[in-house]
């Protein structure tokens, strides 16, 4: 089965042809998609997509760019929304010190609220991290010491040390179209070191279209190129790569039932 573990189909880039994009994904053999929440103000659209399509599930969360608008966010609010049908994860959440669109301390506070919701709900946490390795390391260590939770380092492009620590703490990792970029050898080096039983794939569409579609709008059908890149990087066959990433996906997103 082909699975796109991270799509943003609620994004305005799909307003003109959303149904056609979903149809193309199915034609390409994509059996499941996880629609990612990036702010609570658009969660209704995210959740509606999951409710309308049997092969789409969703998460609930606030991207670090949006954290400044959610300074009063509580774990209880996330848990309330996570109890809805077809919600299978918490996030996308985390730290982004590249753009700093929200104050760093606010990002950290909102991130911790998501961690607490993930711990209490048992749902996996979808983590965004960019240029925040030291703070991310500290938070993950502190929070895992307080109690276990499962988490995914989504579209991982950060440093080797953070990757190693996250792996030791039990993290899953997702590989995106960045792994196909010519200049991304450092990302491919990280992929080679990821725990083989905890790697999944994603598009992060409409962003980060893989080669040969780089520079265009990304869409779920293109996850096949990410899967091929992962196979090449790890030295796995295509069938093995598909099998490994499928098993890893269902181990992480265990609220998603396996299709018959």
Image (cartoon, grey):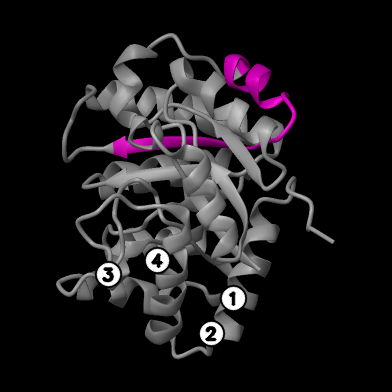
In the rendered image, which quarter is residue 206 located in?
A: top left
> Relative to 238, is 181 above or below?
above
Identify residue for label 1. Answer: 242
Marks 4,2: beta carbons within 8 A: no
* Residue 164: numbered disc: 4
- Marked residue nearer the N-terminal end (3 or 2): 3
- Marked residue nearer the N-terminal end (4 or 1): 4
Instruction: Answer yes or no: is residue 113 visible.
Output: yes
- Marked residue nearer the N-terminal end (1 or 3): 3
- Identify the magenta region: 76-95
Q: Residue at x 53, y 56 (%)?
A: 25
> Relative to 67, is 160 above or below?
below
For the N terminus, the image quarter is bottom right
Identify residue for label 3. Answer: 211
Residue in the foreground of this view, choosing between 106 and 200:
200
Q: Secondary structure at mark 2?
A: helix
């Amino acid at each position: 089965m082909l699975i796109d573990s991270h799509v943003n189909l609620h994004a305005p880039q799909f307003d003109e042809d959303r149904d056609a994009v979903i149809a193309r994904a199915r034609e390409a053999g994509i059996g499941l998609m996880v629609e990612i929440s990036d702010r609570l103000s658009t969660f209704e659209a995210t959740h509606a997509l999951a409710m309308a399509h049997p092969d789409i599930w969703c998460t609930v969360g606030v991207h670090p760019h949006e954290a400044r608008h959610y300074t009063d966010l509580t774990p209880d609010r996330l848990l309330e929304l996570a109890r809805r049908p077809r919600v299978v994860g918490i996030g996308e959440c985390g730290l982004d010190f590249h753009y700093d669109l929200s104050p760093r301390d606010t990002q950290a506070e909102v991130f911790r609220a998501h961690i607490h919701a993930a711990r209490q709900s048992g749902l996996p946490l979808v983590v965004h991290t960019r240029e925040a390795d030291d703070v991310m390391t500290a938070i993950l260590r502190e929070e895992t010491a307080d109690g276990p939770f499962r988490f995914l380092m989504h579209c991982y492009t950060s440093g080797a040390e953070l990757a190693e620590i996250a792996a030791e703490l039990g993290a899953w990792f997702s590989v995106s179209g960045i792994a196909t970029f010519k200049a991304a050898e450092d990302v491919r080096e990280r992929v080679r070191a990821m725990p083989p039983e905890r790697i999944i794939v994603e598009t992060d569409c409409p962003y980060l279209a893989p080669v040969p579609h780089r520079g265009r709008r990304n869409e779920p059908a293109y996850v096949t190129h990410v899967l091929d890149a992962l196979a090449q990087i790890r030295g796995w066959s295509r069938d093995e790569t598909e099998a490994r990433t499928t098993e890893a996906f269902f181990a992480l997103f265990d609220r998603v039932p396996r299709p018959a």
